[in-house]
Image (cartoon, rainbow, N blue to C red):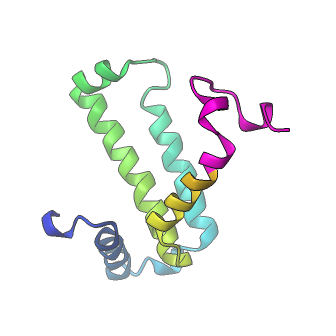
């Protein structure tokens, strides 16, 4: 995509792709959310019966490509849902990270996988 790599431009490309195929009629909130879940399941399926390390995934070009394709599918549907609902994804992620910083203070969460509810007062 080159110069068009900004998230806003990618969303425009996705929206144009959708319009050109007259698929907007199928992109209800529920259908887009379902598609995100379906594609996330396909992402998980790439390593369903294995547990490769990061290095093993990177070295296995076929698996790496399959994971890349499924990540792209999840992201395309997420961005399409953002477009339909008028959500600015960078802003949404920035705000969510700020919320997570408050829920997971470094002094309580560093090196721990415990959910924030385990140390909330």
Residue at (15, 68) in percent of width and height: 3
Q: Nearer the viewer, residue 85 or 29?
A: 85
**Does residue 54 lie above or below 115 as drawn?**
above
Q: How many numbered circles does the render carry?
A: 0
- Residue furthest left in the image: 2
Q: Is 18 left or right of 24, judged from the image as shown? A: left
Residue at point 37%, 82% (across, down) = 19
Q: Estimate the x, y position of residue 66 in percent, counting from the top left.
A: 32, 37
Can you say whether 61 is above or below 51 in the image?
below
Q: Where is residue 85 drawn, in percent x and y?
A: 56, 76
Indicate the quadrant containing the N terminus: top left, top right, bottom left or bottom right: bottom left
Q: Seen in the image, is 118 located left or right of residue 56? A: right
Q: Residue at x 47, y 41 (%)?
A: 42
85 inside magenta stretch: no
Residue most toward the front? 107
Taking the spot 46% from the left edge, 61% from the top edge, the residue there is 77
Q: Position of residue 75 (x, y in %)?
A: 42, 56
- Can you tell which quarter of the image residue 8 is in? bottom left
In the displayed structure, 3 sits above or below 112; it is: below
**Quadrant in which the C terminus is drawn:** top right
What segment is highlighted magenta in the picture?
100-121
**Relative horizontal placement of residue 31, taking residue 3 as reference (left or right):** right
Instruction: Tell whether position 101 is magenta.
Output: yes
Which quadrant of the view contains residue 32? bottom right
The spot of residue 96 in percent (x, y) is 58, 56
């Amino acid at each position: 995509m080159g110069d068009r790599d900004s998230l806003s431009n990618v969303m425009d490309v996705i929206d144009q792709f959708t319009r050109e195929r007259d698929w907007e009629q199928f992109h209800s909130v529920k259908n887009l959310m379902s598609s995100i879940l379906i594609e996330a399941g396909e992402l998980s399926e790439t390593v369903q019966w294995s547990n490769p390390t990061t290095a093993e995934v990177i070295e296995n070009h076929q698996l790496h490509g399959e994971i890349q394709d499924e990540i792209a599918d999840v992201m395309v549907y997420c961005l399409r849902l953002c477009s339909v609902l008028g959500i600015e994804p960078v802003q949404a992620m920035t705000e969510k990270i700020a919320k997570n910083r408050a829920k997971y203070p470094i002094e309580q969460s560093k090196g721990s996988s415990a959910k924030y509810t385990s140390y909330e007062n």
